[in-house]
Image: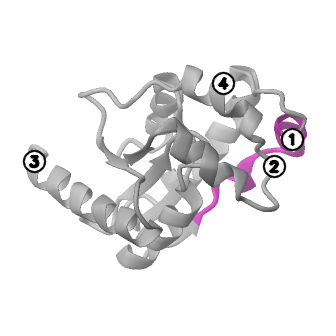
């Protein structure tokens, strides 16, 4: 995979966006940005209280992630961002047209189990249902791949690299 592209690691809470994102960035030799760090304090307080974010809550967050991706265009980078809705991904693409998405997918029970063992994270397992209800998987016209999260983080990161390479080979030349 070309390390000059910006990869957005997306999916519901608990899929391993941060862990896989770090591993992917290391493999590609590019910087990693934690999507949660772009949230304003009000968003984190809301989620900590078990209240799902609204689209209005997410817009400034998405714009800040999009600005980071735009600044990394041609240089490469990996950023985590749930990007659950097509409209969110469209907003990110409007800011940084060449982003590619990696949708981490998995069985709800596995994801809930992993979430229950996380320490120090503001996202409660109680919000997992709202995340799945909001999720709109990648559509065929979106640049990206879906990768299952079963197995170790290293195995998932390796599957991501292979899937991105395969996707890049299939992509039409400009």
Residue 40 image offset from top left, x and y in percent: 83, 44
Residue 45 on the magenta span: yes
Helix, strand or loop status at disc 4: helix
Q: Which part of the image, by quadrant, shows the C terminus?
A: top left
Give me the C-alpha separation between circle 3 and circle 1.
41 Å
Query: Badges 2 and 1: C-beta atoms under 8 Å apart?
Result: yes
Query: Dot 2, how many residues are within 10 Å of its Cα: few (below 14), some (14-19), or many (20+)?
Result: some
Image position of 51 with respect to 161: above or below: above
Residue hosting label 1: 48
14 on left or right of 86: right
Nearer-the-camera pick, 173 or 117: 117
Query: Dot 4, how many residues are within 10 Å of its Cα: few (below 14), some (14-19), or many (20+)?
Result: some
The quarter of the displayed image where residue 150 is located: bottom left
Residue hosting label 4: 130
Residue 29 appears in view: no
Query: Dot 1, how many residues are within 10 Å of its Cα: few (below 14), some (14-19), or many (20+)?
Result: some
Helix, strand or loop status at disc 3: helix
């Amino acid at each position: 995979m070309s390390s000059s592209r910006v990869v957005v690691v997306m999916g519901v809470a608990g899929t391993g966006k941060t862990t896989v994102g770090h591993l992917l960035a290391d493999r590609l030799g590019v910087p990693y940005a934690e999507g949660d760090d772009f949230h304003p304090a009000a968003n984190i307080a809301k989620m900590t209280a078990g209240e799902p974010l609204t689209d209005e809550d997410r817009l400034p967050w998405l714009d800040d992630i999009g600005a980071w991706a735009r600044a990394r265009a041609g240089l490469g980078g990996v950023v985590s961002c749930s990007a659950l809705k097509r409209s969110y991904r469209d907003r990110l693409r409007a800011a940084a047209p060449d982003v590619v998405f990696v949708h981490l997918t998995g069985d709800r029970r596995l994801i809930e189990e992993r979430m229950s063992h996380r320490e120090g994270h503001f996202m409660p397992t109680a919000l997992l249902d709202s995340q799945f209800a909001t999720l709109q998987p990648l559509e065929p016209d979106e640049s990206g791949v879906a990768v299952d999260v079963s197995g170790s983080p290293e195995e998932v990161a390796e599957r991501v690299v292979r899937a991105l390479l395969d996707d890049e080979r299939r992509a039409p030349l400009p």
